Amino acid sequence: MMIYTLNGDNVEITDALRGFVGEKLARLDGQGVKSISADVSLKINGSEQTASGTVRVDGQDLTTITAAASDMHTAVDRLVDKLYAQVRRHTQRLDGRRK
C-alpha cells in the first residue's frame, strides 16, 4: 500500500485533489519493492503550477523531482511519470540490469 504525504503552498488541498494525487501515486505501488512512500508538495506561483515529490523505496530516498504546468492535474501527471521512471530505474539497478 502506498503511503504519501501531501502539502500545499498557495494551494487548497481539497478531498478531490487528494484523491487524484493518491490515485496517480498508486501506479508506483506495483514495482516489486517491499515498501514505498512519497512526499508530494503542490505550489502555485503566478500562472505556473508545480508539483514536486520525493519517493522513498525500501527506506532509501530517491531524487526529488519537480514538474510544472499551467494546470495542477497536468503537473501531477508529469510528476508521477517522472517518479515512476525513477522507481523503475532503481528496481532495475537492484536486479542487476542495465538500461
Image: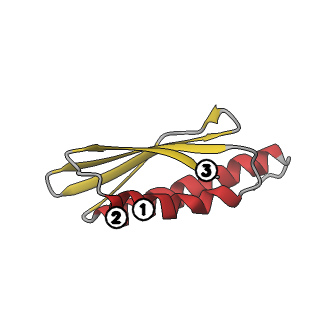
**In the image shown, does 10 or 88 lie closer to the viewer?**
10
31 over 6 or under it: above or below: below
Dots 1, 3 in contact, CB < 8 A = no
Cβ atoms at labels 2 and 1 below 8 Å apart: yes
From the viewer's side, name the closer residue of 78 and 40.
40
Q: How far apart are marks 1 and 3 (CA)?
A: 23 Å
Q: Is mark 3 on a helix, strand or loop?
A: helix
Looking at marks 3 and 2 on the same chain, the residue that comes earlier in the sequence is marked by: 2
**x and y percentages locating residue 2 in the rendered image:** 60, 51
Q: How far apart are marks 3 and 2 (CA)?
A: 26 Å
- Tag 2 residue: 16
Q: Name the residue under label 1.
A: 19
Across the whole image, how many numbered discs are drawn on residues?
Answer: 3
Of the image marks 1 and 3, the number of the one nearer the N terminus: 1
Q: Is disc 3 in contact with disc 2, using a CB cutoff of under 8 Å? A: no
Determine whether, in the image, residue 28 is placed left or right of residue 80: right
Q: Residue at the front extreme?
A: 15
**What's under tag 1, amino acid-wise?**
Gly
Residue 79 quadrant: bottom left
Name the residue rendered at 36%, 66% in the picture.
Answer: 74
Q: Mark 2: which amino acid?
A: Ala
Pointer 3 residue: 86
The residue under label 3 is which amino acid type?
Gln
Q: Which element carries disc 1, helix, strand or loop?
A: helix
Front residue (pair 1, 77): 1
